[in-house]
Image (cartoon, helix red, strand yellow):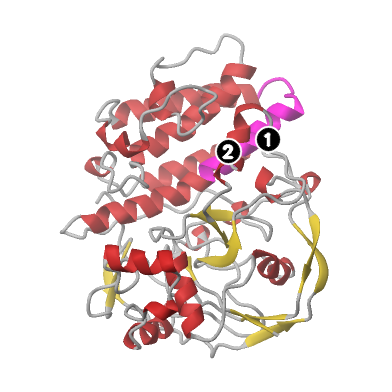
Amino acid sequence: MDGALTEPALAPRDRHAPWGLQDYVAVRAQTAALCAPLAIEDYGPQSMPEASPAKWHLAHTSWFFERFVLQQQLRGYGCLHPQFELLFNSYYESVGPQQPRQSRGLLSRPTVAEVYRYRAHVDEHMQRLLDGAALAPQALQTIAVGLNHEQQHQELLLTDIKHLLFANPLRPAYRPQPAARGSDSRASRCAPRCSYRLYQGGEHRIGAEAAAGFCFDNETPRHRCYTAPFRLADRPVTNAEYRDFIAADGYRRATLWLSDGWQQVQSQRWQRPLYWSEDLDSEFTLSGEVALAPDAPVCHVSYYEAEAYARWSGARLPTEAEWEWAAAAEPIVGNLLESRALQPRPAESSSSPTQIYGDVWEWTGSAYLPYPGYQPWPDALGEYNGKFMANQFVLRGGSCATPRSHIRSSYRNFFYPASRWQFSGIRLAQDA
């Protein structure tokens, strides 16, 4: 590999402030920094249909600004290559055809150098646009969408690279294991004993106020809901706790599993979380194979595994309304991308719901569905979230690969229940 991960370019920002030129430069630099440790050969391969090559991520995030901002807002803008619209469109059917998702790894051309020239071309014109005349509110909103979209792809870059390197029998490292800095010694700490915090329940409001700062359309509208009294675990499930589930024949007991989950276990021969070694003593990380940290949150588990573990432990997964109620009062601090750990770490204390932000995305028991009164964004951007509201489950809280400025209590991530390559983990809940 070509070196260690560069310091993140992003600084903490006020989420109520509009996204502008400074944010644009910082977000785009962060993406390039995440690619810095890659060898040139790492940019092109695609390890599975759900993942995308690093080169494609770099080009697609540039295409987004070209297609939805520059072509509408900058008079005389010239596309660098007319076929890039087909190659790097992801799923916007109203825009035009796309390269099939499962075939993105076949794009040996354009070269990596040409993709970086494409990014530079888009950046030059975007900076000219942002540094020029005042833009209409709708244009500024689309730019904010583009920057938050790129932050999503920063996390996908890391998860897709991790899966790619794991698929290589050499199991190469993306970057060296980072050294602990200052008081950052959580990797060697013991997680506090898990306990449950009581929430009295009642009527409350969830979702984002669109006027309070950037949010995705699937977070709106803010609305009332009722929650019965519940208890929420004060930290995620750890590797050691999940290893107990395996030792108790958790992957062999059909009664613990949803029917579709049991079929997945049988057909895919699941016996442990993705990236764990067969002897359950080590796991593959972005720094290569390392000893399994018993007190770190278990990671890379599917919804099916999370639900089965919760059932085995006599608990359940929280609903997204319960999760948001608990998280709304907590500061947005934790092991996020800016920590540079790129791996879940043990909790520090049990004084409040710890690790509610960062470390691992937490599966909820809630299907990914529209909120009451939901309206997708207009035009092609309406395809961003709404058309995926079927057969998926909501995850909350961000992970060790999520930028801090990207996460909030109302943020709704979503994946299919069999997905495991994301930094996904488990927090338990109980009826009170």
**At 46% from the left edge and 47% from the top edge, which residue is drawn?**
154
The residue carrying pointer 1 sits among few (fewer than 14), some (14 to 19) or many (20 or more) residues within 10 Å by Cα, namely some
The residue pinned by badge 1 equals: 377
Q: Earlier in the sequence, mark 1 or mark 2?
A: 1
Q: Nearer the viewer, residue 131 or 196?
A: 196
Count up the numbered dots: 2
Please check the rendered image and state whether residue 133 is part of the magenta-colored stretch, yes or no: yes
Residue 208 appears left or right of 263: right
Q: Residue at x 57, y 68 (%)?
A: 334
Q: Which mark is residue 384?
A: 2
The span shown in magenta is 131-151
Q: Looking at the image, can residue 263 be seen? A: yes
> Is residue 425 located in the magenta-colored stretch of the structure?
no
Magenta span: chief secondary structure: helix
Residue type at the position of mark 1: Trp
The image shows residue 167 at horizontal and vertical percentages of 23, 55
Picture layout, residue 423 above or below residue 273: above
Most distant residue in the bottom direction: 193
Q: Quadrant of the C terminus?
A: bottom right
Residue placed most toward the observer, 261 or 154:
261
Q: Residue at x 54, y 67 (%)?
A: 362
Q: Residue 189, position in %: x, y?
A: 45, 84
Q: Quadrant of residue 84?
A: top left
Tell me where residue 33 appears, x and y as whole percent.
Answer: 42, 46
Q: Secondary structure at mark 1?
A: loop
x, y percentage for residue 66? 52, 24
Residue at the spot 72% in from the left edge and 40% down from the top edge: 375
Left or right, 202 with respect to 406, comes to right
Q: Amino acid at mark 2?
A: Tyr
Q: Are marks 1 and 2 in contact (CB under 8 Å)?
A: yes
Name the residue nearer the viewer: 237 or 390. Answer: 390
Residue extending farthest top: 76
